[in-house]
Amino acid sequence: MELVLNTFGTSLVKENGNLLVIHKDGKQVIPMDKLKTILISKGAKLSSDAALLAIENEIEILFVDNSGKPQGRLWSVKYGSVSTIRRKQLDFTLSSHAVEWIKEILVQKLDNQAALLFSLVPIDWEFQSSLDKALNKINDYKIKIKSAKANVISEIAPSLRGWEGAASRLYFGIINMMMPSNYQFEGRTQHPATDVFNCVLNYGYGILYGKVEGALIKAGLDPYVGVMHREDYNRPVMVFDVIELYRVWIDYVVIKLIQQEVINADCYIIKEDDSYWLEGLGKRILIQSVNDYFDEVVIMGGVNRSRANQIGLFAQKLATKMVNLKM
């Protein structure tokens, strides 16, 4: 369960050993036995007693911006990254092992994108030839990524980014063809979004950033020590690496919401600069849809877990791999 506080004036306090949400329509006691995360955006209030109670119960607290991306986090000291893992993580990111690891991440991302397109395309689709061409080119980029050789990631990082970016443009080009005519878009736009699809997708990715970062921290990994993005200063670059495995999950949820036209004009606003931003109703619909999807149990690597727990399992295995790897 995820508690979202995104209404101006809403407060979260501690009362009689429970978490209590106070808003304009009254009060609501929040059961802590199923609560995993608290998301707080601008205008909401959090008491120190409520924060400490959440930490004691290992409930993570994220402060997010208007695009849903985490800007700050409170977590238990139990999740502090031990020095052994941190040293091994740094050694790993500077080694040839990291080159093969990030290549595997990107190849899996392209495979995930191709699989999603296959699953969404209707029988006898009028743009089947466009899909076939896109998939062939995506496969070509996958082969290039696999065949790239280097001792350190900096030697091939620009090429990897270029191939991954080109494949993603093809991928989103096909997705655009699947959208209702009034929801089609010209391409990916991030900060800010220039259409409804990208507006919803950006917020979905923001949710995913928080989930991945939390999983890394709980596994003892430093989210600020990455591989392909390691030169980005003061940013959670390991999150940017790992998130590539799971973007397709957000893509699926957003595509379905848009195709079913669940996201309507009441869900977003268009500002004077023609940028699109998700509003309260749209955020509630998307967050609930993402959480429902992430609670579903799936088989990955022969293990049955919810999608949310699969991310945590990946982070734990990555930490173990780094600690045990012989350099």
Image (cartoon, rainbow, N blue to C red):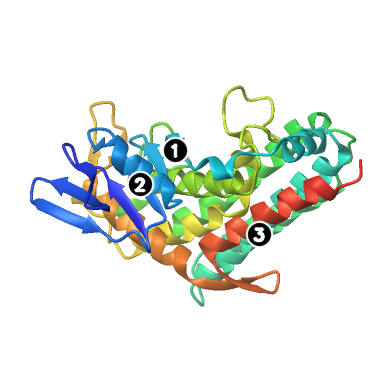
Pick the front one: 203 or 321: 321
Residue 302, compared with residue 171, is above or below; it is below
Q: Quadrant of residue 87?
A: top right
Single out the mark in the foreground, 3 or 2: 2
Give left or right: position of 12 versus 249. Answer: left
Single out the residue that lies furthest toward the top: 233
Q: Report which residue position mark 3 lands on.
A: 135
Could you say which is closer to the camera, residue 45 or residue 182?
45
Q: Is residue 110 visible to us here? A: no
Identify the residue at horizontal 56%, vertical 64% (top origin): 116
Quadrant into which the N terminus falls: bottom left
On residue 53, the disc is 2
Q: In the image, what residue type sits under mark 1?
A: Leu
Secondary element at tag 3:
helix
* Spatial CA span between label 3 and label 2: 50 Å
* Residue placed under numbered mark 1 in the picture: 74
**Residue found at x 18% / y 37%:** 8
The crowding category of the residue bearing disc 3, from other C-alpha atoms within 10 Å (few below 14, some 14 to 19, many at least 20), is many
- SS class, disc 1: strand
- Compared across the picture, whether 165 is left or right of 192 comes to right
Q: Earlier in the sequence, mark 3 or mark 1?
A: 1
Q: Position of residue 79 (x, y in %)?
A: 57, 44
Lower position in the chain sequence, tag 3 or tag 2 = 2
Q: Residue at x 73, y 56 (%)?
A: 139
| Element carrying mark 2 | helix
